C-alpha cells in the first residue's frame, strides 16, 4: 500500500477514536469504536492476506453489533468523561504525532510508522475509557480499543503479523465485546430488579455537558 | 489434528452447556470434559493442522496437560454438582477454559515447528506462538468474566458486576501489554539485535503483563476479588489454569526471543537488564510470601483460595525474573502440576464450605474429626502441592524458588514453603473440639449407612448462593434407609430411589470427589509431573 494511503488510514483511525470520545450517545460511541476497528488495517503498509483480513473485519463488526445490542437495553446517554471529551480528543491528536515521532526515532528495520502513529493514538483514546469512565459500555469500548492499539503497535514494531496472530487478536476483540455485553446486560437486569447500580447514573446537568447539541433528545429519552 | 479435536470437543460442550440449563448443561459439560481425557491421550501426538499458515499441534506433553486439566475440571464439576453449589455459568465456563488452555498449548507447540526466518538477525523459531497463546488465553479470560456475576447474592450484583468489569479490563490490558512486549524485540524479519535498554523494556512489559494477569502485588486485590466474588468451582479454571497457560506463553517468549537476542547482543550481563530482573524478583518474593501469609490469616475459605492463588503468581514471576535459562523449563513443568493441585484445593474448599453451610474457618472447629474423607482430601491436596523429598513437584518448587540466585533466592526458598501455613491452620482447626455447627451433623458419611448423614446438609448460602436451594423432599425421605449400603445401591440403580439416594448423599459424594481430586493431583505430582509442561 502507498505510504500516503497508510498515513491517511492512520489519520482517519485517530479521527474515529477522537470522535468516539466526544459521543454522549452510546450508539455513536459504539459506531466510533467499529470505525476504529475497521479502519485499523488501512494503517499497514501492506494489507494482510484476504482470509485473516476478512476474519478481522467480521470480528470488528461482530464486536460493534454485540455492544450495540447491549446499549439497546441500557440507557443511551453516556456520562461525561473526566475532562469533558474535547481535551481527551486533543490528547489523541497529540498521540498521533507522538507515534509518528517514535516510529521515526526507531528508524528502519521496523514496521510501518503509520501503524505506530495510529496505535499510540488509539491507546491514548483507550486510557480515559478504561481508567476513568464510570459506565460499563465505555469500559467495554476501552477494552476493545486497547487490544486494537496493541495489535497496531506490535505491527509497527515487528511488521505485519502472521495470519494466526491476526485471527487470535480478532478473537480477543470479539471476546472482549461479548464479555462486556453480558456484563452490561447483567447490570441492566440488576437495576431493573431494583438493585443498586454498579455505576452511577449519568448526570444530566452541570458539567455533564448534556446541553451539547444533539444531546437534547438523548436526555429526554432517559 | 489432535489439538483441533480436543478443542472442538471442549468448545462444543461449552457452547452446548451455555445454551442448555440445569442438569442438561452439567451432563453435556461433564461428557465433554470426560471425552477430552481419552481424546487427548489416545490420538497420535504431534499430528499437526495448519491454520492460516501457522502450525497448530499438541505434542505429547501438551496432551498430558490437557488430559490432566480435563480430569481435574471434571472433578470440580462433579463436586459442585454433588453439593448443589454450581451456578448456571459454571459448566460452560469450565469447558471453555479447557478449550482455551488446549488452544494456547497447541499454539506454543505448533509455532515451535515453524522454520526460522531466513533473514533474521538472530535465528529463532516459533516467535509467533507466544503472542497467539497469550491472546487466546486473554480472550477466554474476558469471556469468563461475566460468570463472576452469576453467583452473586441478591443485592450484591452491583459489586459483582464491577468486579467482573475490572476482571475483563485487567485481562484486556494484560493481553495488550503482553502483545506489545513480545513484539518489542522483533522486526519484520525476526528477532533484532537490540541494546540493553530495549531488552529491559521488553522484559519489563512481559513481566508486568504476567504480574497483572496473575494478580501479583500490587495487582493482587483485583485477582483476589474475582476469585472471592465468583463461583468457587470456576476459580481453578480462571485463576489457575488460564494464568498457567499465560505464564507458559511468557516463558516461551523468553526462551525463543529474549534469550537469543541477549546472547547475540551481549546484554545478558547489562546492569539495566539485571536491575529489571531484580525488580521482578522482589515483586515475586513479596507476592509469594505476602499471598501465603494473608491466606493463612484469613478467616474465609474463599479468601484462603484466592490468596493461595495470588501466592502462586510469585513463583511464576520468578521464572521471568531469573537469568538462569533452566528456570523457564522448570516453570513450564511446575505450572500445570500446580494447577492440578490448586484445582483439587478449589474442589476441597467448595465441598468443605457447602458441607457445613459456612465458609468461615472459625466456625469449622473439629471439621476433620467429623469428616475423615475431607481430612484425607486436604492431606492429599497438601501433598500434591508441596510433595515430599524425591517427588518431582518438590524438586520443581525448590529449583524454581532458588532460580533467582543470591540472597533473593534464599529468601524465595523460605517464602515458597510459607504456602504450607494455610494447610497447617486448616488442619489445626480441624483437629480441635468440634464447634456447635460442626458437631451437630456428620457430613462425611453417606445417608445409606444409617448415620446422621449428609441429608442433614444445611445450606445457608454463605459459601455458594446456589447451595441455598432447598433439598427436594424426596431427599429427606431417603435419610432413614436401613439396608446396607451396597444392597441399597444395587437396588436403587436406575430407579427413582437411586436419584433420591444421590440427592441425600450429596455432601458425602462431594467429599469423595474432593478426595479423588486430591489423589489425582498427587498422582500427577508424583508420576507424571516430570513429563508435564515441557514445550521443547
Image: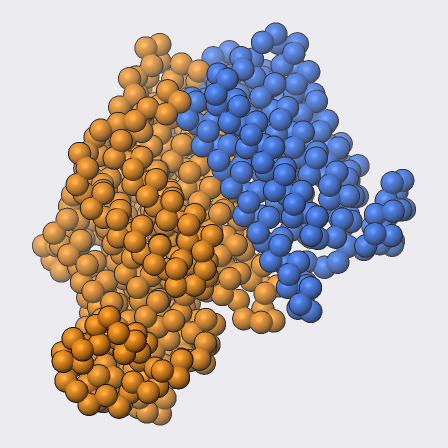
What's the residue at 54%, 15% (across, down)? A47
Which one is in front, B480 or A5?
Answer: B480
Which one is in front, B64 or A103?
Answer: B64
Which one is in front, A73 or A198?
Answer: A73
Tell me: residue B288, above or below residue A35. below
Tell me: residue B388, above or below residue B62. below
Residue B535 in percent (x, y) is at 24, 35
What's the residue at 47%, 12% (across, down)? A109
In-image side of A76 versus B488 (left or right): right
Question: Is residue A144 at least partly visible in the picture?
Answer: yes
Most extreme residue toward the left is B390
Tell me the blue chain: A
In which image quadrant can residue B105 be found? top left
In-image side of B137 versus B517 (left or right): right
Name the image quarter holding the C terminus of chain B.
Answer: top left
Question: Is residue B259 at least partly visible in the picture?
Answer: no
Residue A78 in percent (x, y) is at 75, 48
Name the image quarter holding the N terminus of chain B.
Answer: top left
In which image quadrant can residue B83 be found? bottom left
**Number of marks in the image?**
0
What's the residue at 30%, 26% (across, down)? B49
Residue A175 in percent (x, y) is at 51, 41
Tell me: residue B154, above or below residue B178. below
What's the residue at 56%, 30% (across, down)? A58
Which one is in front, B209 or A70?
Answer: A70
In which image quadrant can residue B370 be found? bottom left
Amino acid at each position: 500500500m502507498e505510504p500516503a494511503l497508510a498515513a491517511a488510514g492512520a489519520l482517519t483511525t485517530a479521527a474515529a477514536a477522537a470522535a468516539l470520545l466526544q459521543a454522549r450517545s452510546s450508539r455513536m460511541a459504539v459506531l466510533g469504536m467499529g470505525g476504529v476497528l475497521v479502519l485499523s488495517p488501512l494503517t499497514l503498509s501492506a494489507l494482510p492476506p484476504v482470509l485473516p483480513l476478512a476474519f478481522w473485519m467480521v470480528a470488528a463488526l461482530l464486536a460493534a453489533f454485540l455492544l450495540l445490542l447491549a446499549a439497546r437495553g441500557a440507557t443511551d446517554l453516556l456520562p461525561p468523561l473526566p475532562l469533558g471529551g474535547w481535551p481527551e480528543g486533543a490528547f489523541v491528536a497529540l498521540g498521533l504525532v507522538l507515534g509518528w515521532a517514535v516510529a521515526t526515532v526507531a528508524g528502519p528495520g521496523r514496521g510501518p510508522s503509520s501503524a505506530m502513529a495510529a496505535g499510540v493514538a488509539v491507546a491514548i483514546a483507550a486510557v480515559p475509557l478504561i481508567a476513568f469512565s464510570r459506565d460499563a459500555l465505555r469500559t467495554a469500548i476501552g477494552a476493545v480499543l486497547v487490544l486494537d492499539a496493541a495489535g497496531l503497535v506490535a505491527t509497527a514494531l515487528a511488521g505485519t503479523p502472521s495470519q494466526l496472530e491476526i485471527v487470535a487478536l480478532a478473537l480477543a476483540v470479539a471476546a472482549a465485546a461479548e464479555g462486556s455485553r453480558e456484563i452490561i446486560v447483567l447490570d441492566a437486569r440488576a437495576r431493573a430488579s431494583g438493585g443498586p447500580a454498579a455505576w452511577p447514573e449519568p448526570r444530566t446537568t452541570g458539567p455533564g455537558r448534556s446541553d451539547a447539541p444533539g444531546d437534547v433528545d438523548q436526555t429526554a429519552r432517559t | 489434528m489432535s489439538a483441533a479435536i480436543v478443542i472442538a470437543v471442549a468448545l462444543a460442550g461449552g457452547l452446548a452447556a451455555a445454551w442448555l440449563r440445569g442438569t442438561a448443561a452439567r451432563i453435556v459439560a461433564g461428557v465433554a470434559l470426560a471425552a477430552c481425557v481419552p481424546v487427548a491421550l489416545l490420538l497420535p501426538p504431534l499430528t499437526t493442522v495448519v491454520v492460516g499458515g501457522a502450525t497448530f499441534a499438541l505434542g505429547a506433553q501438551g496432551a498430558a496437560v490437557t488430559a490432566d486439566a480435563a480430569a481435574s475440571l471434571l472433578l470440580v464439576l462433579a463436586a459442585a454438582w454433588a453439593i448443589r453449589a454450581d451456578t448456571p455459568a459454571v459448566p460452560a465456563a469450565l469447558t471453555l477454559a479447557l478449550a482455551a488452555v488446549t488452544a494456547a498449548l497447541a499454539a506454543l507447540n505448533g509455532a515451535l515447528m515453524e522454520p526460522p526466518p531466513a533473514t533474521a538477525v538472530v535465528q529463532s523459531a516459533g516467535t509467533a506462538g507466544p503472542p497467539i497463546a497469550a491472546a487466546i488465553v486473554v480472550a477466554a479470560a474476558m469471556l469468563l468474566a461475566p460468570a463472576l456475576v452469576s453467583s452473586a447474592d441478591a443485592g450484591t450484583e452491583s459489586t459483582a458486576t464491577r468486579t467482573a468489569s475490572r476482571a475483563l479490563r485487567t485481562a484486556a490490558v494484560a493481553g495488550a501489554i503482553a502483545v506489545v512486549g513480545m513484539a518489542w524485540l522483533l522486526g519484520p524479519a525476526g528477532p533484532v539485535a537490540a541494546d540493553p535498554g530495549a531488552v529491559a523494556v521488553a522484559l519489563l512489559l512481559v513481566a508486568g503483563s504476567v504480574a497483572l494477569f496473575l494478580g501479583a502485588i500490587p495487582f493482587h486485590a483485583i485477582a483476589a476479588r474475582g476469585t472471592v466474588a465468583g463461583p468457587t468451582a470456576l476459580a481453578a479454571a480462571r485463576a489457575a489454569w488460564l494464568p498457567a497457560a499465560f505464564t507458559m506463553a511468557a516463558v516461551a517468549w523468553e526462551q525463543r526471543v529474549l534469550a537469543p537476542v541477549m546472547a547475540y547482543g551481549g546484554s545478558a550481563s547489562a546492569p539495566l537488564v539485571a536491575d529489571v530482573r531484580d525488580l521482578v524478583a522482589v515483586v515475586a518474593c513479596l507476592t509469594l510470601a505476602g499471598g501465603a501469609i494473608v491466606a493463612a490469616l484469613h478467616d474465609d475459605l474463599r479468601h484462603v483460595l484466592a490468596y493461595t492463588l495470588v501466592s502462586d503468581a510469585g513463583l511464576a514471576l520468578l521464572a521471568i525474573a531469573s537469568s538462569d535459562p533452566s528456570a523457564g523449563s522448570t516453570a513450564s513443568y511446575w505450572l500445570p502440576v500446580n494447577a492440578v493441585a490448586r484445582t483439587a484445593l478449589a474442589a476441597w474448599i467448595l465441598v468443605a464450605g457447602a458441607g457445613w453451610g459456612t465458609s468461615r474457618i472459625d466456625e469449622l472447629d473439629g471439621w476433620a474429626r467429623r469428616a475423615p474423607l475431607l481430612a484425607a482430601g486436604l492431606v492429599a491436596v497438601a501433598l500434591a502441592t508441596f510433595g515430599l523429598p524425591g517427588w518431582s513437584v518438590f524438586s520443581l518448587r525448590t529449583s524454581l524458588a532458588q532460580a533467582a540466585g543470591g540472597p533473593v533466592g534464599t529468601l524465595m526458598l523460605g517464602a515458597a514453603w510459607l504456602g504450607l501455613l494455610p494447610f497447617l491452620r486448616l488442619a489445626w482447626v480441624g483437629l480441635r473440639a468440634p464447634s456447635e455447627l460442626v458437631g451437630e451433623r456428620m457430613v462425611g458419611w453417606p445417608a445409606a449407612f444409617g448415620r446422621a448423614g449428609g441429608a442433614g446438609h444445611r445450606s445457608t448460602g454463605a459459601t455458594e448462593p446456589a447451595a441455598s436451594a432447598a433439598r427436594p423432599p424426596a431427599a429427606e425421605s431417603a435419610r432413614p434407609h436401613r439396608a446396607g449400603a451396597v444392597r441399597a445401591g444395587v437396588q436403587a440403580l436406575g430407579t427413582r430411589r437411586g436419584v433420591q439416594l444421590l440427592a441425600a448423599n450429596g455432601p458425602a459424594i462431594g467429599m469423595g470427589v474432593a478426595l479423588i481430586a486430591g489423589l489425582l493431583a498427587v498422582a500427577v505430582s508424583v508420576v507424571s509431573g516430570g513429563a508435564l509442561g515441557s514445550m521443547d
